[in-house]
Image (cartoon, grey):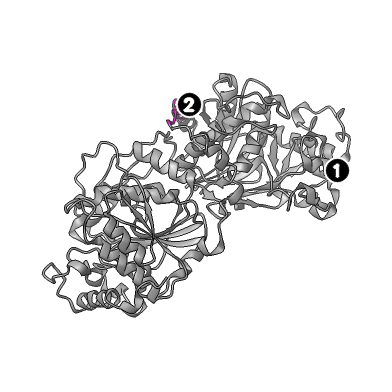
Amino acid sequence: HGPAQKPKGKMIPETPMVSIYVSENTHKERAYVTFLAGNGDYVKGVVGLAKGLRKCKSAYPLVVAILPDVPEEHREILKSQGCVVREIEPLYPPNDQVSYARDYYVINYSKLRIWNFKEYNKMIYLDADIQVYDNIDDLFDMQDGYLHGVLSCFCEKFWSCTPLYSIGYCQHCPEKVTWPNEMGPSPPPPYYNAGMFVFEPNTLTYENLLQTLQVTPPTPFAEQDFLNMFFEKVFKPVPPVYNLILSVLWRHPGSVDLERVKVVHYCPPGSKPWRYTGDEPNMKREDVKMLIKKWWDIYDDVSLDFKPKSPNKLISKSNIITSVPEQSVTYSPAPPSAAREVVEVTSPEVGHMIDLPLISSHKVQDQSEKVVIQIRVYSIRETAGNGDYVKGVVGLAKGLRKVKSAYPLVVAILPDVPEVHREILKSQGCVVREIEPLYPPDDQVSYARDYYVINYSKLRIWNFEEYKKVVFLDADIQVYDNIDELFDLPDGYLHGVLGCFCEKTWSHTPQYTIGYCQQCPEKVTWPIEMESPPPPPYYNAGMFVFEPNLTTYESLLQALKVTPPTEFAEQDFLNVFFENVFKPIPLVYNLIMSLLWRHPENVEQDKVKVVHYCAPGSKPWKFTGEEAFMDREDVKMLVKKWWDIYNDESLNFKP
């Protein structure tokens, strides 16, 4: 399973990452992962975990992220147990002057490096003091786009630094203590134990984590506090059976059915099986002693030792893995203002966070939470900033009124848009907002159309944080039926309509060469000689639904600095950036004009809500009917339909 190669028509960002090539039989899409530092005895915990996963017949490998100070002897032990050993660099927070709940917690920030293990689509993180007693592979099927984990317990003295401990409040029994009004309107958001969680590695989420760490003061529970803050809005709790924190046995005994527990976390003082003496508080309990014995039964079971199918392959794989240290990722530290925002944002890697990119929790009035937005793009082949696309925006504003949309139209304009055009837009009820131009680095590419270069300025709209959700529409689009339902699409994704590769403008791509198109993938089998699967879904960036967010915006700017421009400019860029969080929607929301003649079988004109006049010669305000396909009756009908709205004075804005 080597990493899929992108087709030539698809842009590849130059974000540093590590690719590890292992046996073809390795489940590269999914893996368990744990973390190990130093030359202490935690290596026993990892060995026990590896054997536990084998005992419960997990289908996926265990990756061990190790720091450079892990001795060679311990590395060999891990390899001999079938672990995938991967070295990472230590990671520390800035201004590390906090008093941690336990001194060694500071090194746990290095755990963030696992978000850069992008060769895996989904991973389950398990601390080295965890044991798995029943198969938990079902966790890999948890919903994408979220971080899944088990709620913590705040009842141990360990948490005495928190207001929750002082009032006796715990997430495991929230009904027992009424939240005091003087402490705020409601309890804090759900807080999970970071010894076990399900996540999706993603380079962009990884960079966001590093960037946010630089402006986030460390706190007593180190990376656990940090991850809870970072992923707050995309956290989903899973049942405690997937991470039984041992102290729950005596703090909330009524909530524990040991026969159903799948994962035990030996985290209270004195509970590490390989250090167990029974002297610490609660360690003489029969249920604790039973769980200690259960751990040792697995650790001592030689039948659970790893048995490679081919010793040669094991050695070869190990040599490859250990020879690939993690590379550094360059990023620009966030400005100080970001420190105020990061406590209210979370990711799609997004991973992708998103993967990726983070979803703002910025609160706005209900009526302005949702907005249709249009970036004002002028052709650089005409008088700069003074073209006739203003007619397209006016037509769009009137079209949205005709279909009785409940939300405003924001027009992002560049500084060279003349005052007369700004006044026209305002007179049509548009919210006019000026943005600065944005260009890619080393702009020496030949764009599919010359004016595409200015379209990178479209990225500025991710900075419109006063809006919770936005529908972007190009100026050559018209809306013929209400599409307000798009605002109710699931958060955390970018939604759009798949493009078509059948026009000559795509002649530089392998899709065009072999006649492959997303609109009819069943008609052309993807050739084996391409040595990669079909490319990921690719959407037309003339219409998409997204959530503005400052952190995502900064990530976009950062990625743009290291991404060579390509033929389709910002459309290529956005497709790569949001690849792992893109969700397709029906083509009725963005009928690309060429589909009328390339894929007529896919088009039901009576159901089409949005028409995109993007084919050469199809702009209604420039239409002559002389270009290819422009003499078709369906095209002429749609051009007339646009003019009927544009010329309808009853649709003018009435303040």
301 to the left or right of 318:
right
* Amino acid beneath label 1: Trp
Please tell me which residue lies in front, 467 or 195: 467
Asked whether disc 1 touches disc 2, contact meaning CB atoms under 8 Å apart, the reply is no
Q: Magenta stretch containing residue 321, yes or no?
A: yes
Q: Residue at x 73, y 44 (%)?
A: 152
The residue that disc 2 covers is 322
Q: Is residue 503 visible?
A: yes
627 to the left or right of 216:
left
Measure how far apart labels 1 and 2 are at the Cα level.
42 Å
Task: Please provide percent x and percent y for residue 57.
Answer: 62, 46
Q: Magenta stretch containing residue 166, yes or no?
A: no
Question: How many labels sit on residues?
Answer: 2
Residue ranking furthest to the left: 626
- Local secondary structure at mark 1: helix
Establish if 76 lies above or below 332.
above
Magenta-highlighted residues: 320-330
| Quadrant (top left, top right, bottom left, bottom right) of the N terminus | top left
